[in-house]
Amino acid sequence: MLQQSVAVFLVLALLLAAVWFLRREGLATYRLPGISKGFARRNHERRLRVIERLALTPQHSLHLVSLGDQMAIFVTSPAGCERVDTTPQLRPVAPQESLKSGASC
């Protein structure tokens, strides 16, 4: 019984030492939701959000990104990332809105 308790203690001590070392080197981070100090502020004041992603091929995709009060469309490929359009009027359209307005694809 004592030998098993010591083994469990050593495993936990090694795990905590590894986490401490990785955090100190900047290779790992962890946050518990609702406990970290800036948790509420980070979610409400976020200015950059990915609204939607559309995969065109396994290596090419379109990204609709919100940048504060503007929306931007980016295309990504193995060659890099390029902004296609940025406009303050661009906004996501809910499926119900497009059906009500009579828009077709």
Image: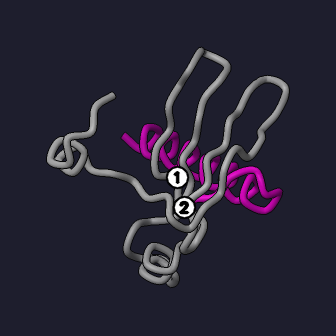
Nearer to the camera, 89 or 22: 89
Q: Is residue 79 above or below residue 86?
A: above
The residue depicted at 50 percent of the width and 38 percent of the height is 53
Helix, strand or loop status at disc 1 = strand
The residue depicted at 43 percent of the width and 38 percent of the height is 4
- Is 27 one of the magenta-colored residues? yes
The residue depicted at 20 percent of the width and 41 percent of the height is 102
- Is 57 one of the magenta-colored residues? no
**Dominant SS in magenta:** helix
The residue depicted at 51 percent of the width and 50 percent of the height is 9
Type of the residue with mark 1: Val
Residue 32: x, y in percent? Answer: 44, 65
Residue 105: x, y in percent? Answer: 33, 28
Q: For this view, does 61 lie left or right of residue 89?
A: right
Q: For this view, does 58 lie left or right of residue 4?
A: right
Mark 1 in CB contact with mark 2 (< 8 angstroms): yes
Name the front one of labels 1 and 2.
Answer: 2
Q: Residues within 10 Å of mark 2 (few under 14, many from 20)?
A: many
Nearer to the camera, 37 or 98: 98
Type of the residue with mark 2: Ser
Q: Which residue is mark 2?
A: 66
Q: Earlier in the sequence, mark 1 or mark 2?
A: 1
Nearer to the camera, 33 or 74: 74
Q: Which residues are magenta?
A: 1-30
The image quarter in which residue 16 lies: bottom right
Q: For this view, does 10 lie left or right of residue 34?
A: right
Q: Which mark is residue 79?
A: none
Residue at the farthest front position = 102
Q: Is residue 41 above or below residue 84?
A: below
Q: Which residue is mark 1?
A: 50
